[in-house]
Image: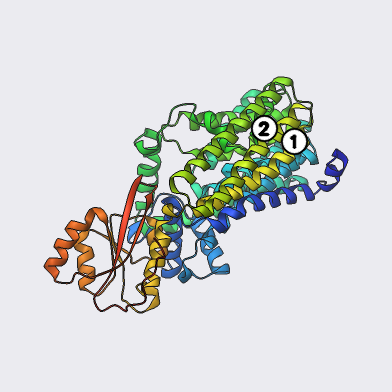
């Protein structure tokens, strides 16, 4: 595609809209194909479903346990999405993922909108498309958690702030200037939304960026014209009603748990299961940013060599302090740096507005090949360890398209056709990501909860069928995904509890490690139950292989046995 044609297609409102469409295409396969995931996604989805069932939209709970870790925002969004597109009784995961997909689209739109003002329409579209197609954001777009929507909210806030900052560099911001009210609204509403979704994380991006930028410029006057008089009340209006309601409903327990335990453990390093070394995010960035990895060295080079430009300086101040905070923090998860990806994508787009140097072209090609090799290696490992014949086709598409994104994109980059190389890499990368979602769907040993539910339904044992009373009792495999597919009342128990369930006429599922204790318990109750099927698999949350036997009570109906779930 030639430059004039691309410029015509992305002019005005088209660029941000097309960037959001790229994010939609990249994220939709994961939303549709992946089964409910353990553990965070299924916890979020189950807590939302309980809101819909109970009508309590303030006190967040997973079964009977308080889930006072994150604010309410994503739960409300998921509840609206489910209410508009599905029914809570269907236990389908896709509707709960819709807000995440919309968050990714918002992030891509906001990056493109900001980029069009900073570097031109073509660069703006490329920034949004690069962000929307990254493996990390497109993956989070298909998972019912907070992170994609948080990225959207933070990118929206920073886009508004970028426009205000750039306007202040031309002339002092004028109080009440109608042309800047929208920018201020974007800033404050994005910041408020980020707080309602994930507490202080949005502030962790905005505040260090503003401080570093003001210190670098040695100018503070522009901050006085950000609309504090109505912006702060708007933020309070977004967050305040829920904050008051949850304080009353939980007698302050939410804040003790969310700040004292959840956030406190992450800051002090008590959350040892999610540790990592300083520099970990830099090491994994080529994989998480793929296929945009191709332009990563050029973006870093532009950030350094063009730091005197106000637009570049703004992006550097957005990226560097927040990234360093995440690198220093003892608790690390791959998605934590996602709120900085908007700055990286905009730096990439800025780099594409000028010829890219030889070192950056070779380094970008090398990093893209590295990312493709790692993604292909993970795919091949998953296929080898857990795959079926059906997964081979999906895996092959994943590996081939990841390789093509790196090799063809890298070849064109080396031959000074950077924009064309990026567009081709994005196309292949999106297909590779979609095929990876298809591959994961076919790794049946990892989809334990849906196969257990299918086994129950096949034998008339699911309480929703009305043939056998519930709740279902299950030992050892106490993963949230099974609670989500089976319902709030699912009994997570031990061998004695499983035996008691059979004695009460309810189904039971027993893990192989509990077999002996279960037999002893049923001998005491005198109700041994009837084994109707076995589901084997790998619990990726614990790293353990599992073998789960489904037992029907003696008086349960006897449909024909089937192999489903094996």
Answer left or right for 565 relative to 224.
left
Residue occupied by mark 2: 294
Instruction: Give x and y (percent) for residue 30.
Output: 56, 53
Instruction: Give x and y (percent) for residue 241.
Output: 49, 57
Estimate how packed mark 2 is, as few (under 14), some (14 to 19) or many (20 or more) residues with alpha carbons within 10 Å: many
The residue nearer to you, when weighing 86 against 506, is 506
> Which image quadrant is residue 291 in?
top right
Q: Tell me the residue at 49%/42% (across/down).
A: 200
Estimate how packed mark 1 is, as few (under 14), some (14 to 19) or many (20 or more) residues with alpha carbons within 10 Å: many
Q: Which mark is residue 421?
A: 1
Q: Spatial distance from mark 2 to mark 1, Cα to Cα? A: 9 Å
Q: Tell me the residue at 25%/75% (across/down).
A: 505
* Residues under numbered marks 2 and 1 in contact, where contact means CB atoms less than 8 Å apart: yes
Secondary structure at numbered mark 2:
helix
Using the rendered image of the protein, determine whether residue 14 is visible from the camera's viewpoint.
yes
Answer left or right for 422 relative to 261.
right
Secondary structure at numbered mark 1:
helix
Instruction: Give x and y (percent) for residue 68.
Output: 39, 52
Answer left or right for 501 relative to 537.
left
The residue nearer to you, when weighing 463 against 460, is 460
């Amino acid at each position: 595609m030639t430059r004039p044609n691309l410029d015509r297609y992305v002019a005005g409102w088209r660029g941000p809209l097309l960037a959001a469409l790229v994010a939609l295409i990249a994220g939709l396969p994961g939303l549709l194909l992946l089964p409910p995931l353990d553990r965070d996604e299924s916890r979020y989805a189950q807590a939302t479903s309980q809101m819909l069932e109970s009508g309590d939209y303030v006190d967040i709970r997973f079964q009977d346990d308080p889930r006072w870790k994150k604010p309410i925002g994503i739960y409300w969004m998921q509840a609206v999405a489910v209410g508009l597109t599905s029914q809570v009784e269907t236990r389908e995961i896709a509707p709960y993922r819709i807000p995440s997909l919309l968050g990714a689209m918002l992030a891509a739109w906001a990056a493109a909108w900001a980029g069009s003002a900073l570097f031109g329409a073509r660069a703006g579209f490329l920034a949004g498309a690069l962000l929307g197609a990254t493996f990390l954001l497109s993956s989070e777009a298909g998972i019912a958690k907070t992170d994609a929507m948080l990225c959207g909210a933070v990118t929206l806030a920073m886009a508004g702030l970028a426009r205000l900052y750039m306007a202040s560099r031309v002339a002092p911001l004028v109080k009440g200037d109608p042309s800047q009210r929208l920018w201020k609204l974007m800033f404050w509403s994005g910041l408020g939304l980020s707080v309602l979704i994930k507490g202080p994380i949005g502030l962790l991006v905005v505040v260090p960026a503003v401080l570093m930028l003001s210190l670098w410029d040695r100018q503070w006057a522009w901050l006085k014209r950000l609309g504090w008089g109505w912006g702060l009340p708007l933020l309070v209006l977004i967050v305040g009603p829920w904050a008051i309601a949850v304080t009353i409903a939980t007698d302050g327990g939410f804040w003790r748990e969310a700040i004292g335990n959840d956030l406190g453990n992450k800051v002090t390093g008590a959350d040892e299961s999610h540790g990592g070394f300083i520099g970990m995010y830099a090491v994994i960035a080529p994989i998480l940013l793929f296929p945009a990895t191709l332009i990563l060295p050029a973006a870093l080079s532009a950030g350094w060599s063009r730091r005197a430009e106000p637009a570049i300086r703004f992006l550097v101040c957005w990226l560097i302090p927040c990234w360093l905070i995440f690198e220093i923090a003892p608790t690390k998860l791959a998605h934590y740096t996602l709120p900085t990806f908007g700055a990286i994508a905009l730096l990439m787009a800025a780099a594409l507005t000028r010829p890219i140097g030889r070192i950056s072209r070779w380094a970008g090609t090398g990093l893209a090949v590295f990312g493709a090799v790692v993604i292909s290696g993970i795919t091949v490992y998953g296929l080898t360890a857990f795959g079926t014949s059906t997964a081979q086709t999906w895996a092959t598409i994943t590996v081939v398209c990841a390789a093509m994104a790196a090799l063809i994109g890298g070849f064109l980059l080396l031959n000074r056709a950077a924009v064309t190389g990026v567009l081709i890499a994005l196309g292949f990368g999106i297909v590779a990501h979609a095929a990876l979602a298809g591959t994961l769907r076919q790794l049946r040993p990892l989809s334990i909860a849906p196969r257990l539910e299918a086994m129950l339904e096949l034998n008339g044992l699911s309480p929703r069928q009305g043939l056998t009373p519930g709740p279902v009792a299950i030992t050892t495999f106490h993963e949230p995904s099974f609670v989500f597919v089976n319902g709030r009342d699912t009994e997570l128990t031990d061998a004695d509890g499983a035996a008691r369930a059979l004695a009460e006429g309810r189904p039971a599922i027993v893990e192989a490690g509990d077999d002996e204790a279960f037999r002893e318990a049923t001998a005491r109750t005198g109700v041994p139950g009837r084994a109707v099927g076995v589901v084997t698999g790998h619990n990726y949350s614990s790293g353990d292989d599992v073998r789960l036997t489904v037992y029907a009570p003696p008086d349960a109906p006897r449909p024909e046995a089937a192999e489903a779930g094996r």
